[in-house]
Image: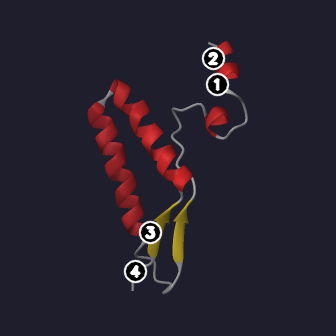
């Protein structure tokens, strides 16, 4: 039996922001990235432990400002460094 895979609200928001960020430079890459994320999500559901739920908490893209994404600094601090 496949596991249930659930997305936390923050993870859905993270994914949307990552796709929007990538789409600015390459719509094709954004589509490919989203496909890879969903493929990985499908593979999570096939783990063998019956009755377990996989909860995706966050989605972070390495091209993003990770300190900003993790709430370790503000947008104003990030913009001040540019």
- The quarter in which the C terminus is drawn is top right
Nearer to us: label 1 or label 3: 1
Up-down relation of residue 53 to residue 66 (above or below): below
Whole-angstrom CA distance, mark 3 to mark 2, is 37 Å
Up-down relation of residue 81 to residue 27 (above or below): above
Residue under numbered circle 1: 75
Q: Which mark is residue 51?
A: none
Residue under numbered circle 2: 79
Image location of residue 63, percent across then percent down: 51, 32
SS class, disc 4: loop
Nearer to us: label 2 or label 4: 2
Whole-angstrom CA distance, mark 2 to mark 4, is 44 Å
Dot placed on the residue nearer the N-terminal end, 4 or 1: 4
Whole-angstrom CA distance, mark 2 to mark 1, is 6 Å
**Viewed as shown, does residue 24 lie left or right of 57?**
left
Q: Are marks 2 and 1 in contact (CB under 8 Å)?
A: yes
Up-down relation of residue 74 to residue 52 (above or below): above
Nearer to us: label 3 or label 2: 2
Dot placed on the residue nearer the N-terminal end, 4 or 3: 4
- The quarter in which the N terminus is drawn is bottom left
- Residue situated furthest front in the rendering: 9
Tell me what residue is drawn at x 40 percent, y 80 percent: 2
Residue under numbered circle 3: 44
Tell me what residue is drawn at x 53 percent, y 54 percent: 9
- Residue situated furthest left in the rendering: 28
Dot placed on the residue nearer the N-terminal end, 1 or 3: 3
Q: Are marks 4 and 3 in contact (CB under 8 Å)?
A: no
Residue under numbered circle 4: 2
Image location of residue 27, percent across then percent down: 28, 32
Image location of residue 66, percent across then percent down: 62, 36
Whole-angstrom CA distance, mark 4 to mark 3, is 9 Å
SS class, disc 2: helix
């Amino acid at each position: 039996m496949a596991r249930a895979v659930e997305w936390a609200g923050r993870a859905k928001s993270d994914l949307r922001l990552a796709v929007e960020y990538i789409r600015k430079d390459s719509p094709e890459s954004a589509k490919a990235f989203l496909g890879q994320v969903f493929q990985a999500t499908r593979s999570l559901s096939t783990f063998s432990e019956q009755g377990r739920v996989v909860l995706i908490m966050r989605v972070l893209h390495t091209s993003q400002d990770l300190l900003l994404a993790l709430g370790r600094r503000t947008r104003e601090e990030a913009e001040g460094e540019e």
